[in-house]
Image (spheres, helix red, strand yellow):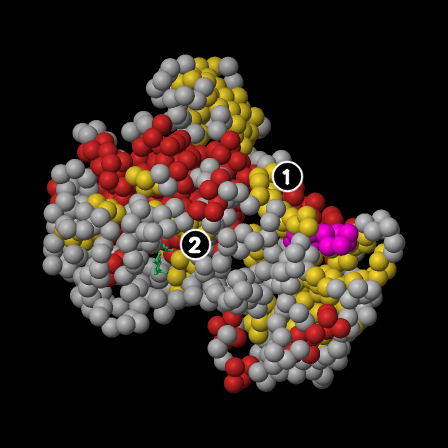
């Protein structure tokens, strides 16, 4: 069953009924000001940091679902009926409901008693504000007398404090109202130099800024007293719950359409010029007035929207493909790339499943996110790399997370996730191959943000590798620390106290438990660093890193092979995890994927065997599960992984993030059919037709899909912000389609399904447009390359000479 359809031409998903199984979200904003918006206008906005600079309130896990948003009410002043064009929060029956989620914007509307409303929500590029452009059309034969009420609820900035510290917060709320604009200025009197504003393009019949005055006591957003009565209270918030609501009265002739624009934004004043007059407590509005006035003009709002469209044309234009498979095309060309950008921006901080207060940016997460994003905005990738590296510790270790606003490592979560540092190498390697910008390696970057500790980025990478070698266990394999990629495999935790964090509790000294996963990742990272060293002319170092990698590979083969697949780990007792000897958790997906990606066992059949085991033991119609058999009870020595009921999350769900590792591994084995089959199983577009089972958005990947051990097998959760986005994008674009940036040039080495006759693609790489045509002549993967009509050996298109704008690449596969 479907709840809408893809409009690929417009690059939109069009939702045609409001009661989707879960709120289906989109994101507004590209760089600093962000918003989440659901298909019924739920969601909230923030500036840079979803926890520390929250502009509007949202009630997570509330009932009804999806409470709090950018709500507009319409009221027919003759019949006194009122409704929400976005269905929520009034939830009256709607006609012609539609929500078009596009690239950085959403358009939501419906018709009620022949009054049609459409609202386009978006954040202009380079602005810290959002625009709601609403049009109302009277399709009646007679004039209509209408009232429009806008509404938002302000958050008192720190979202965690806002949701908990009521003894203070009920007394601190402050607003100003001037020239029709509502200013939210809680704490502006003291240490904050920022405020929010909410403006309307029309003359107002009234306004409200105090929630209780607007809703009425003991009433909810579904029937505000002010809307019911058709008259604002003109309330001014003193403490309690500041909101923003404008009231506009409209008279529409038959057939007439009118536009009303609302602008919600964030603004910072220089500290010394906060107030105007300077000795007053009134916000200095000299600068902000111009910004507000600009976007209340329809032509400026339209121009900003067109600029946003062009922005996405350009970004998506960097990689466009035409294959025989609709779902591949749609995801590569539109949604997967878009999701990569959103995930890069927000890491795992703010979605329907991440409250925005739990986490900052993850170190390993953000490094992996670079893989799907780096071609779209290399300068932002560069900045992110330097920010991440600046939180690295001088030991080479890493804070697990940092707050985007302060760019400091998060002490609460701390360090000792022993895979973390290696991901920096993987991320930087992707950046270098895409851009060729080796200057980044010379950038002085501090450790733990301490001034005076700066070392070139390259040294950070060296320490990352060293960090693993300094922490080897009894088998010579990497010690796992708190956890490796799998945050829930906590082999040193041994927690028997409810409420303790599995992420931070460590009851063992950590000198025994080892990770084969980190072993595989180390081999991969050592190879990357060796290639970088080679490019820098540091051949001795390159040789050493390769030797380190080879040594680790030997160790993995000796102590990390279980007979038919790669082992997962050794626990604190030195016993095997992920082995046929275990009763449960006999085989895990992660080491199979990462070891084969690192090239281990490609030549001698180990890789083939491991991937067969994955296929046989972990494959399901909904994707590949993380482990089997699922853990049936809590195991003190394994930690959080065994806290989840079987089939969910790390305990044997389809944890989508590592499906692409197996996909890449299959392409390394030359198996395009299987790679693409696995890809299709988790492809959200291909799953659209089972939306009632999948339940999450059909246009973006999710973190997990319940595994066969769960009663809800096939049900997705944790959509949007997941490493699945970047890895799937990398798997399909670089490994199945095979178009890979390398230091020598653009490689084209497709491993596509045998039944595909070929594909065409346009890829802009280092400023040059590559027009690529792949034609299948035989069933294999061997490439015959022609570049601008001339035969070229191998499968890498050499870097074109300076000034070249376009290159024609044709590939025959046989
Ligand atoms: C989740 C993991 C996550 C970890 C850290 C666990 O509860 O299952 O997926 O990585 O929390 O946030
Ligand atoms: C989600 C976390 O963000 C990520 O860092 C981790 O690798 C996976 N969960 C697996 O536990």
Which label belongs to residue 718?
2
Evaluate whether residue 123 shows in this view.
yes
Magenta: main secondary structure equals strand
Question: In terms of sequence position, does the residue under pointer 1 or pointer 2 come before the other?
Answer: 1
Q: Is residue 175 left or right of residue 486?
A: right
Residue sitting at 14 percent across and 50 percent down? 582
Can you say whether 448 is above or below 651 in the image? below
Out of 650 and 201, give the one closest to the viewer: 650
Mark 2: is the Cβ under 8 angstroms from ligand 1? no
Which label belongs to residue 10?
1
Q: Residues within 10 Å of mark 2 (few under 14, many from 20)?
A: some
Q: Residues within 10 Å of mark 1 (few under 14, many from 20)?
A: few
Out of 751 and 433, give the one closest to the viewer: 751
Quadrant of the frame with the C terminus? top left
Q: CA distance from mark 1 to mark 2?
A: 26 Å
Q: Which percent across, then down, holds residue 610?
A: 22, 36
Dots 1, 2 in contact, CB < 8 A: no
Q: Is residue 786 left or right of residue 27?
A: left
| Residue 110 inside the magenta-drawn segment | yes
Q: Which percent across, then down, holds residue 271?
A: 63, 75
Instruction: Find ligand 1 in the image and state its quadrant.
Output: bottom left
Can you say whether 797 is above or below 479 in the image? above
Residue sitting at 35 percent across and 21 percent down? 781
Q: Which percent across, then down, holds residue 49?
A: 52, 64
**Part of the protein shown in magenta:** 107-122
């Amino acid at each position: 069953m479907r709840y809408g359809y893809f409009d690929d031409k417009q690059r939109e998903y069009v939702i045609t009924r409001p009661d989707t199984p879960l709120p289906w979200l989109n994101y507004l904003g590209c760089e600093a000001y962000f918003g989440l918006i659901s298909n019924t206008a739920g969601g909230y906005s923030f500036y840079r940091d979803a926890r520390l600079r929250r502009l509007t309130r949202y009630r997570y896990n509330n009932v009804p679902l999806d409470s709090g948003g950018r709500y507009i009410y319409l009221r027919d002043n003759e019949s006194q009926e009122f409704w929400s064009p976005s269905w929520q929060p009034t939830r009256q029956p709607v006609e012609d409901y539609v929500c078009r989620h596009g690239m950085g914007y959403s358009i939501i509307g419906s018709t009620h008693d022949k009054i049609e409303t459409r609202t386009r929500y978006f954040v202009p590029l380079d602005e810290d504000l959002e625009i709601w452009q609403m049009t109302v059309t009277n399709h009646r034969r007679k004039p209509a007398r209408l009232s429009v009420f806008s509404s938002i609820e302000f958050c008192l900035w720190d979202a965690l404090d806002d949701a908990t510290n009521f003894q203070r917060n009920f007394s601190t709320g402050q607003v100003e109202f001037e020239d029709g604009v509502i200013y939210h200025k809680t704490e502006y009197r003291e240490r904050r130099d920022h405020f929010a504003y909410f403006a309307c393009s029309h003359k107002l019949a009234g306004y409200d800024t105090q929630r209780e005055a607007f809703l009425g006591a003991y009433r909810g957003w579904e029937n505000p007293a002010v809307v019911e009565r058709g008259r604002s209270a003109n309330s001014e918030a003193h403490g309690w719950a500041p909101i923003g609501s404008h009231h506009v009265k409209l008279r529409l002739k038959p057939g007439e359409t009118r536009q009303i624009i609302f602008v919600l934004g964030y603004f910072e004043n220089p500290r010394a010029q906060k107030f105007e007059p300077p000795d007053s407590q009134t916000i200095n509005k000299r600068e902000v007035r111009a910004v507000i006035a600009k976007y209340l003009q329809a032509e400026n709002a339209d121009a900003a929207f067109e600029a946003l469209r062009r922005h996405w044309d350009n970004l998506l234009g960097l990689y466009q493909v035409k294959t025989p498979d609709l779902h591949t095309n749609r995801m590569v060309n539109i949604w997967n790339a878009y999701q990569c950008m959103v995930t890069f921006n927000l890491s795992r901080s703010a979605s329907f499943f991440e409250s925005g207060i739990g986490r900052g940016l993850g170190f390993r997460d953000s490094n992996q996110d670079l893989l799907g994003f780096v071609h779209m905005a290399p300068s932002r990738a560069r900045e992110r790399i330097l920010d991440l590296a600046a939180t690295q510790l001088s030991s080479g270790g890493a804070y697990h997370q940092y707050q985007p606003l302060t760019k400091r490592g998060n002490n609460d979560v701390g360090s000792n996730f022993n895979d973390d540092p290696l991901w920096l190498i993987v991320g930087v390697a992707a950046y270098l191959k895409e851009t060729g910008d080796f200057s980044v390696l010379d950038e002085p970057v501090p450790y733990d943000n301490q001034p005076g500790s700066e070392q070139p980025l390259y040294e950070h990478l060296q320490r990352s590798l060293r960090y693993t070698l300094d922490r080897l266990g009894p088998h010579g394999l990497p010690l796992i620390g708190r956890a490796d990629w799998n945050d829930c495999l906590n082999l040193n935790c041994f927690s028997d106290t409810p409420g303790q964090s599995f992420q931070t509790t460590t009851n063992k000294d950590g000198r025994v438990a080892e990770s084969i996963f980190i072993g595989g990742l180390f081999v991969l990272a050592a190879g990357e660093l060796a290639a970088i060293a080679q490019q820098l002319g540091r051949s001795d170092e390159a040789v050493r890193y390769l030797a380190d990698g080879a040594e680790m590979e030997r160790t993995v083969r000796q102590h990390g092979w279980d007979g038919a697949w790669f082992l997962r780990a050794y626990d604190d007792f030195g016993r095997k995890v992920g082995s046929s000897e275990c009763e449960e958790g006999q085989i895990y997906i992660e080491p199979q994927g990462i070891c084969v990606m690192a090239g281990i066992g490609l030549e001698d059949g180990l890789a083939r065997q491991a991937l067969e085991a994955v296929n046989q033991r972990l494959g399901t119609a909904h994707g590949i599960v993380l482990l089997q058999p699922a853990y049936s009870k809590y195991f003190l020595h394994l930690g959080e992984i065994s806290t989840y009921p079987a089939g969910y999350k790390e305990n044997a769900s389809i944890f989508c993030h590592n499906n692409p590792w197996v996909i890449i591994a299959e392409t390394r084995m030359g198996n395009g059919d299987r790679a693409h089959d696995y890809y299709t199983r988790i492809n959200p577009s291909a799953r659209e037709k089972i939306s009632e089972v999948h339940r999450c958005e059909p246009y973006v990947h999710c973190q997990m899909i319940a595994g066969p051990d769960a009663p809800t097998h096939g049900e997705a959760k944790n959509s949007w912000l997941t490493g699945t986005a970047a890895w799937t994008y990398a798997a399909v674009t670089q490994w199945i389609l095979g178009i890979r940036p390398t230091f020598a040039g653009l490689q084209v080495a497709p491993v596509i399904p045998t039944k595909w006759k070929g594909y065409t693609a346009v890829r802009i790489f280092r400023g040059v447009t590559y027009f690529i045509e792949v034609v299948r002549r035989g069933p294999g993967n061997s490439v015959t390359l022609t570049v601008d009509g001339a035969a070229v050996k191998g499968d890498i298109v050499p870097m074109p000479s300076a000034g070249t704008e376009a290159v024609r690449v044709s590939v025959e596969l046989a």
